[in-house]
Amino acid sequence: MPKTASKGNLEEFFACLAADTAFMSALQANSLSEQDNHYIVHAAVQAQFGDTTMTLEDFWRLFARHSSIAPLPLSKAVHAHRKWQKKQHNVERGAKRTVAKDLGLKSDALPYAKLAEVIPDLEIICHIREDSNEYKRGTTLVDVGNEDLLANLTGPFLAVPPPGKDWYIVSPGKSAIFVDTEGKIELVVICGCCGMRPDILEYVNGVISEAVHDHKGVRPNHGGELIQYGWNAGARHLRVFGLVNNLTQKTQKNLTDDEHQQKDGAILGILALTWNLLTTTLPEEVVAPTKAAIADAGLPPMASKGDIKECGYYLDLPCGRLHFQAADRAPAEAYMSQNYTAPIHKDRLYAPYAFNWVTEHRVYDHKLAKIGPSNPHSLGGNYVDVSLRVVVTCAPDTAMVLHPP
C-alpha cells in the first residue's frame, strides 16, 4: 500500500479509475501500456495518496491485494483483462517454441565432422592459403564476364576467378567448409539456416533496410552502405568507448523518442536472433573459440541507448511480438549492410573468426543489369577470399564464417 494510503484512500483510488472512461476503455480493449501511467497518477492525486509517482505495475499490485474493495465494473474489467493476458501468454509461448524448434535455437553447435552427417550436401574441402601479399590491397574485384562494369575505373582490378589458378567457386545453395592440412577451419558456408521460416527472413530484411536508411555508413568511399551498431572505441583521433551514435541528422530530427526506442528494439532483436542462430548452426570449432575470445575481451553485450541489458530480446513477427527474455544478446559490435562493395583488404579482429549472415540477394531489373541467357554477366554481390582462392556466390539465407589470415 502506498505511503499514508488508508482503506478510504484506496476505495477512492479504485473509484476514480472506474469512473475514468478513457482508462476503462483502454483496459477493456486490452491496450494499456507504459504510456498510460498518467491514468494511475491522476487517480492517486484524486485519492490524496502520499506518493503519487505511481505506474500501471503499482495498480496491478494494489488490485491483487485489495480487489475486494474495488467497484464491480473495475473488477470485471480487470478479471477479463487477466484472462486475455493468460491466453496471449499461452499463444506467445507456443509461437516461441515453434520458432526455436524451426531454427534449432536450443541446439548445441556440432563439430564439423558431425555437421557433415546432418547436412547431406555439406562438403569438407582442404584448401591451402597462399601468400596474402600476392594481390595488392585496394584492388577492385569483379566477376569474370562483368569487366565492362569497370569501364571508367582508373585503378587496378582483378577478375575472379583468374584463369589458370586453383580457385574454388561455391555455387548458390551449396554448403562447404574449407580446412587446412591440419583440419583447422578457414571458411564456412552453410545455406538455408532459416529456410523453414521465410517470415522471419522477411522481417529481418525489413529491419535492416530501415537501419541502413536511418544511419550513417562507416565506409562512405565504398559502394553501397555498411553501418555499425552497438559499442565501439570511438573515432581514431578520440578514443572513447561507448555506444555508436550514427543516426543521420534527418532521422534524428524526424524521430520521436518512442519511435527511436522502437527501432532500436527491432535492431537489437534481429542481431540477437542472428547471434543465437549462427552459434547453433555453425561448427563447434569456430563457435567455441570465438565465444572464448569475446569473454576474454570483457566487452559488454550488444545494447542501445536506454536498453543496456545482459540478455533478452523480442521479434515483431506477423503472429505478434515474441519475447525471448533469457536468450543471449549479440556481442558488443555488429554491422548491417546493403549493396556493399569493398576492394581487397585485410580485416583485423580480436576474435579468431567473424560471423556473417546473408539474408537477401535479388536483382530487381535483370534487363538493366544485362543478365540473361545471351550474356555471361554474374548476379554480383559475391564474397571473395583471394588468399584462400575461393569465391562464394551470393545467395539469400547463407551463414558464413570468415577467418582473416
Image (cartoon, rainbow, N blue to C red):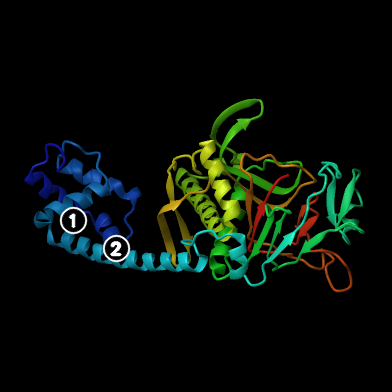
State left or right for residue 215 relative to residue 179.
left
- Tag 2's secondary structure? helix
Q: Quadrant of the C terminus?
A: top right
Real-space CA distance between mark 1 and mark 2, rounded to the nearest whole angstrom = 20 Å
Q: Which of the two residues, 106 or 26, is positioned nearer the viewer here?
A: 106
Left or right: 210 as drawn, with respect to 384: left
Could you say which is closer to the camera, residue 394 or residue 403? 403
Judged by depth in the image, the label closer to the viewer, 1 or 2, is: 2
The image quarter in which residue 194 lies: bottom right
- What residue is drawn where x is 38% and y is 65%? 92
The residue identified by callout 2 is: 85
- Looking at the rendered structure, which numbered label has been put on residue 18? 1
In the rendered image, residue 74, in percent from the top left (x then y), is placed at 18, 59
Residue 76 falls in which quadrant of the image? Answer: bottom left
Helix, strand or loop at mark 1: helix
Above or below, comparing residue 153 to residue 240 in the picture: below
- Give the amino acid type for the residue marked by disc 1 in the picture: Ala
Q: Residue at x 52, y 65 (%)?
A: 103
